[in-house]
């Protein structure tokens, strides 16, 4: 017999809004059975604050994205996430140019880095906020490997200049922590947040 502590919350009849236009996050949610009713990209300033640490940045941006969309959409569940890649305290950009991507790959080559994802779910006055960190070890990259990867264009718009779910998987020697977090959304934690709000898989 299920105890009250183990019982699932009453199912929510609210729509789920994903505050992100990232196709990776849509695919990851679908992997665990969730399909957003609407997708609305949050337009916020993602510039790190002075001396802001990578993990704090990921949490802040996820919360600000969720809050921005929740303010415009009453009676909905709003899910937002943000992923930050760092080497030590250095925050790597979401690369928009090949030069940026090359600099990131050369910095991470042969060393470890961290991937932090903040996840925020807002349901009216209720808010849940989590941050997940994964550690990634990249092999030492040859100049030809970096050049070939840049030619692929896969780095465009990616935090740290690479996508672990693509060709860059061949560069990753070891991962400690959530793999889906590195792709862009930690699924275990996200599923728990949605369950806490009473939202069920499709």
Image: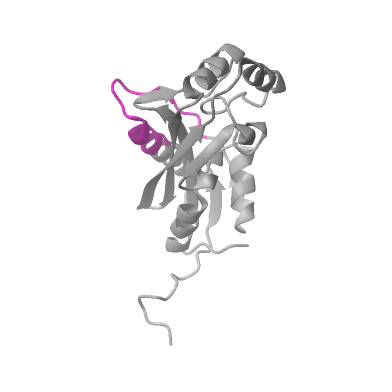
Q: Position of residue 115 (x, y in %)?
A: 45, 36
> For the point 40% across and 75% down, which residue is it?
6
Chain part drawn in magenta: 42-61
> Left of 152 or right of it: where is 125?
left
> For the point 36% across and 35% down, which residue is it?
55
Viewer-side residue, 126 vs 120:
120
Q: What kind of colouring is applied to the model shown? A: one colour
User: From the image, which quarter does the N terminus lie in?
Assistant: bottom left
Q: Is residue 71 visible?
A: no
Viewer-side residue, 10 vs 109:
109
Viewer-side residue, 168 vs 42:
168
The kind of secondary structure the magenta stretch mainly shows is loop
> For the point 42% across and 28% down, which residue is it?
86
Q: Is residue 49 magenta?
A: yes
Viewer-side residue, 120 vs 53:
53
Q: Position of residue 163 (x, y in %)?
A: 60, 33
The single residue placed furthest to the left in the displayed view is: 51
């Amino acid at each position: 017999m299920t105890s009250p502590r183990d019982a699932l919350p009453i199912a929510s009849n609210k729509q789920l809004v994903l505050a992100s236009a990232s196709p990776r996050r849509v695919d990851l949610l679908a992997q665990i059975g969730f399909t957003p009713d609407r997708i609305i990209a949050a337009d916020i300033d993602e510039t790190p604050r002075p001396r802001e640490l990578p993990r704090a940045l990921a949490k802040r941006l996820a919360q600000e994205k969720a809050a921005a969309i929740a303010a415009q959409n009453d009676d909905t569940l709003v899910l937002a996430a943000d992923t930050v890649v760092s080497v030590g305290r250095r925050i790597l950009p979401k690369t928009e140019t090949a030069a940026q991507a090359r600099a990131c790959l050369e910095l991470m080559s042969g060393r470890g880095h961290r991937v932090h994802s903040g996840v925020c779910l807002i349901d009216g006055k209720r808010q849940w906020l989590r941050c997940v960190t994964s550690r990634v070890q990249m092999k030492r990259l040859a100049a030809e490997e970096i050049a070939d990867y840049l030619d692929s264009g896969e780095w465009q718009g990616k935090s740290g200049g690479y996508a672990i779910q693509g060709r860059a998987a061949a560069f990753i020697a070891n991962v400690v922590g959530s793999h889906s977090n590195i792709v862009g959304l930690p699924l275990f934690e996200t599923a728990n947040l949605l369950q806490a709000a009473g939202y069920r898989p499709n």
